[in-house]
Image (cartoon, helix red, strand yellow):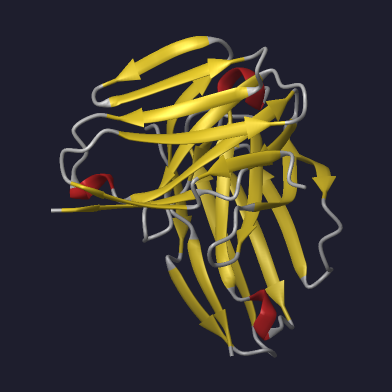
Amino acid sequence: KNEVEQSPQNLTAQEGEFITINCSYSVGISALHWLQQHPGGGIVSLFMLSSGKKKHGRLIATINIQEKHSSLHITASHPRDSAVYICAAYNNNDMRFGAGTRLTVKP
Amino acid sequence: DTEVTQTPKHLVMGMTNKKSLKCEQHMGHRAMYWYKQKAKKPPELMFVYSYEKLSINESVPSRFSPECPNSSLLNLHLHALQPEDSALYLCASSRGTPANYGYTFGSGTRLTVV
């Protein structure tokens, strides 16, 4: 069993829909990172969280340390949001990646 | 400059070739990383350099040879690769402990071994 589990694996949405991607982890962590990877391969850092909630534009990330769970929300989704979203859990210098959620937003 | 720059973006090489991948950052980050990513899989850590010294080698075959000539530059030398080594190779850097500062990733080099 992977220590970092993401769901769903694949997600297709219509433009404008509210999207939620979930990340659960089984190890104690000091921080969690949400990353976005476009088809070209480059990875962009979206959020680093150790508690609470962060918001940037249409993206919101939350984390519940007690429940070992984090969510990434996208409001008013757009086709340019289509990408793979990866959560990565940190325990000091050790990092574990989730398998990623492939999001496709259709116009 | 807030980027990690990787060159080349694409590379096709034969199994007898020797080639190098290059990664550069000018953010003053003292930790640099090489990751390998196969299609539809998460990145896998290969090497970690901290203050220009190799600190982690995740049991990577010797046909991959990392080098950190200075604090801004990280190379990955490739020799006698196999077709299964075809993958996206990602470089990343970090200002300090990743749990505190996170990573900055490059765009990757897509390697095809023929």
Residue B1 falls left or right of residue A48: left
- Residue B53, given in percent of the width and then of the height, sits at 79, 39
Q: Is residue A107 above or below residue A73?
A: below
Q: Is residue B72 above or below residue A104?
A: above
Residue at position x 64%, y 14% from top?
A65
The answer to which quarter of the image holds residue B48 is: top right
Residue at position x 77%, y 21% from top?
A28
Question: Given the current orientation, which residue lies at the most extreme left position?
Answer: A107
State whether residue A70 appears in this view: yes
Q: Quick one: B69 or B63, which is closer to the camera?
A: B63
Residue B63 falls left or right of residue A98: right
Work out which quarter of the rendered image holds the C terminus of chain B and state it.
Answer: bottom right
Q: Quick one: B47 or A2, which is closer to the camera?
A: A2
Q: Is residue B95 above or below residue A82?
A: above
- Residue A53, given in percent of the width and then of the height, sits at 44, 12
- Residue A7, given in percent of the width and then of the height, sits at 52, 43
Residue at position x 73%, y 41% from top?
B49
State whether residue B52 appears in this view: no
